[in-house]
Image: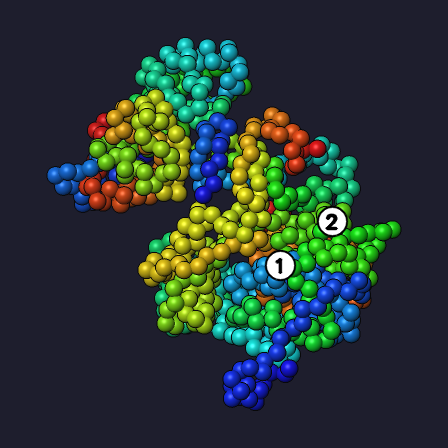
Amino acid sequence: MLKIKCPWCGERDQSEFSYGGEAHIVRPAEPDELGDEQWGDYLFFRTNTKGLHREQWVHSGGCRRWFNAVRDTVSYRFHGVYRHGEEGPGKDEPGSPS
Amino acid sequence: MTGTVEKRAVLAAFDDEEQLVDEHAGVALIEHPFQGYLNLRLDPANDVLGGAVANVLGVALPAVPNRTAQGDGVVVYWLGPDEWLLRTPSEDDMTVFGALSGALGDHWHALTDISGGMTHIAVGGEAAAAVLAQGVTIDLHPKVFPAGHCAQTVMARSNVLIAPTGDAGNAFDVFVRRSFADHVLTFLRDAAHDVGYRFSRKAL
Amino acid sequence: MKYSLAKLVAQTLGGHRGWTRAWRDPEPKPHYDVVIIGGGGHGLATAFYLARVHGVRNVAVLEKGYIGGGNAGRNTTIVRSNYLLEGNEPFYEFSLKLWEGLERELNFNVMMSQRGVINLFHSDAQRDAFVRRGNAMLMHGADAVLLDREQLRAMVPGIDFDNARFPVRGALMQPRGGTARHDAVVWGYARGADARGVDIIQNCEVTGIRVEDGAVTGVDTGRGFIGAGKVGMAVAGHSSRVAAMAGLRLPVESHLLQAFVTEGLKPLVDRVVTFGAGHFYISQSDKGGLVLGGDLDGYNSYAQRGNLPMVEHVMECGMAMMPMLGRLRILRHWGGVMDMSMDGSPIIDKTPVRNLFLNTGWCYGGFKATPASGWCFAHTIARGEPHALNAAYRLDRFLSGRVIDERGGGPRPNVH
């Protein structure tokens, strides 16, 4: 059982949360300007990191807010959570947004 | 065409069902029907709005997550960083709604009457925490969950809002959406099977 | 050594002391015509068909652990071809036909059991969807039968037909579907490939892919550099990592899928049954244990172990379908890392790197595809172009919009 620390509600059980995939994928501001390659990359291609992964969660069974987390996809250990717009822990660690 | 339609409580279907009561009945399950519920969303950084709301409610909106505040005839529950639930005694009394609408004016906000969509089950008795704990994963002990706190969580797969109503760990308010209410009550009765329960409704 | 009844009798009389290794344990050569990364079912099948169909025998299969120790040993062994879409059904039906002849072709007992795969439906809308799917299967030469409640009750009496929320109205059945022994498939292909000259090299992890002038030249491994004319990747859950060694990004996320085996029982479920109201499926192994599974854990994972909320969810689905399961004990439980593609369908294709080929995105449907996947991947590697059967499984379909989304879930790999 994962224990996930919601930035607002604190530590709760995994069953209160839903997963939102890789974080920091920014929707292109001008989709009409993009070629197939860039649009396809935005929509379908992922880093699929083994190790520290920056990802989105939503506290769907609680305050219903989205936030980001840094989690190890092998050990499942959470290395920190941060709100959207915040920089997050370990800027220099692997998996940090470029 | 005229005529009256009698209001029916969300959990009325359970009224005639057999109660499981023994001399040590561990929990009382009491539905408090027909209360007013307002959902309020606004920008907490806007001090003007905060002040206006506090004037109407007689208490400031709780800024700390998962806290409640008692105002004049209204209880406020924190739902999110920009979202609160306001509970008033009667769904027919639109006083608070009107006063808030006036105070908030054209500022960015959302005030929604969700009274018909909710009901309230008070769970009380020495086994109250033990019964609830069968369905939730949060810690209900009064040391970490005293009066003045609240928590949205998942109970028996349903989203609920739970708030203790004392510091003895034996009384909780459970708020649930009406379409999940019969499932939640059925779950609570099931969870209380070993300790005994009585289901009733608070008279208007 | 060719296996036969006569051989078995002779060995029995000789105290079983005359059996020889089923495949060699060779040292890697400095160079191969083709190197396959990944010694699971797909990789070994690819090597087998490269040698048997295309005459390419100077082939190595590199496995970081032992063969069949990854997802080939972590699946629930179901074989079927009950797909709807044009890009999928011909491929999976071809695969099922290969399964039907596999034991003869490999001279190996893979315990193929065509016991029938039954998909329950619970509503009129679901029945309509299954009728459509059944018709699509029939049009592609597969078999499909619509069962009403009474026919179904005679086949699988333990189902809760009158569940208040999910009453069972009937089922779509593919009689030729069933199960096979997962290890035996791996061993059979390994033995067949080895006999045709393929080197199966275990404990040999690939640590890098060398690319010069846009073409692959070989792989770095824990046992040194191995040169290769062509390289094929068939590494299931780790596709993104291996592809990244050649500078590629994939439309894939790795997710965790759990599976369970109960204590052994007398024959109870002699078909494969899937629940239409939740993600749950069940069959019974020859040892008597019920084999069951359900949904993904839901978040990116390379952990090969599952978490408890999904254990609870799978058991709830199981008991909703067959309440009697509540009395059983789960004996074993494991997790495998799935390479979930963004449309739920696989990729068997060339890559932008010359002579580097990709086989990935099997989601949780890779086992049944093993023969056709190997056959098509071998064709693609040998000819440098996909076969018509895997022509739709292109890598660039995610750029051109020609996705094959059976479930209609969109680019969310954790819902396929």
Dot 2, crowdedness within 10 Å: few (<14), some or many (≥20)?
A: some
According to the picture, the residue beneath numbered tag 2 turns out to be C245
Which is more toward the observer, C234 or A37?
C234
Please tell me whether mark 2 sits on a helix, a strand or a loop: loop
Q: Residue at left 55%, top 55%? A: C336
* First-in-chain label (1 vs 2): 1
Q: Are marks 1 and 2 on the same chain?
A: yes
* Rendered position, B172 above or below C266: above
Q: Chain of mark 1?
A: C
Q: Residue at left 77%, top 72%? A: C57
Q: Quadrant of the N terminus of chain C?
A: bottom right
Position of C56 compared to B177: left or right?
A: right
According to the picture, the residue beneath numbered tag 1 turns out to be C65
Which is more toward the observer, C229 or A56?
C229
Please tell me whether mark 1 sits on a helix, a strand or a loop: loop
* Rendered position, A54 above or below B150: below
Rendered image quadrant of residue C18: bottom right
State the image coordinates of residue C204 (x, y, percent, origin top left): 68, 58
Q: Residue at left 34%, top 21%? A: B148
Q: Give the total of numbered labels.
A: 2
Label at residue C3: none
- The type of residue carrying mark 2 is Met
State the image coordinates of residue A25 (x, y, percent, origin top left): 66, 36
